[in-house]
Amino acid sequence: MTSKTADLCDEFSGELKVCQQEFKAYGMRRQFSGPISTVRVFEDNVLVLNALETIPAGNVLVVDGGGSRRCALMGDRLGKVAQDRGLAGVIIYGCVRDTAELATMETGILAIGSCPLKSKKAGKGDVDVEVKFGGIEWSPGEYVYADEDGVVVSARNLV
């Protein structure tokens, strides 16, 4: 990423959606950006893994986990898939686990918290749909920009 979210807000405030949800950073990469791919699940990470294995390199997987803190939707195994496939990052409206291992991975990983319990494996949810959390709508194909100051979304690539 070549521009900070604060700079993007200064220059493009009229066309940005600013996420109101605060996230914690778990991966090594603190600044990342890319086209959005989406998954909506609830306490079930099968579709998260499928998306990590199939979305294009350079994309950011946005996971609407319903804000649940009862289990993790991503751990070290899924984090390694994201890193090895060259994804720009993962943003999870839910929890992660294996945080010490995630901290060593060269990928952007944001989540609302951590929980040691693994998720269900039923494969329920939706892929490539508009999701809503943090006061904004996240649509596949839009662009997300994340850094230490926050997360912003644009309908087009700004950098």
Image: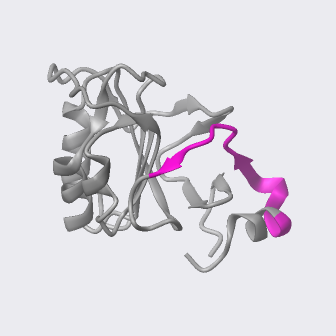
The reply to whether the magenta stretch includes residue 15 is yes
Residue 55, x across and y down, in percent: 28, 54
Which contiguous range is marked in magenta?
10-25
Q: Quadrant of the N terminus?
A: bottom right
Q: Is 136 displayed left or right of 146 in the figure?
A: right
Residue 138, x across and y down, in percent: 55, 40
Q: Quadrant of residue 92?
A: top left
Nearer to me, 85 or 15: 85
Q: Quadrant of residue 98?
A: top left
Residue 158, x across and y down, in percent: 65, 70
Nearer to me, 85 or 101: 101
Q: Quadrant of the C terminus?
A: bottom right
Residue 121, x across and y down, in percent: 14, 23
Nearer to me, 65 or 26: 26
Q: Residue at x 74, y 53 (%)?
A: 16
The reply to whether the magenta stretch includes residue 132 is no
Q: Is 91 displayed left or right of 104 in the figure?
A: right
Q: Is 10 displayed left or right of 146 in the figure?
A: right
Q: Residue at x 19, y 42 (%)?
A: 50
User: Measured along the vertical axis of the image, is residue 159 above or below residue 32?
Assistant: below
Q: Quadrant of residue 45?
A: top left
Q: Residue at x 58, y 30 (%)?
A: 133
User: Measured along the vertical axis of the image, is residue 61 above or below residue 121?
Assistant: below
Q: How is the image coloured?
A: one colour
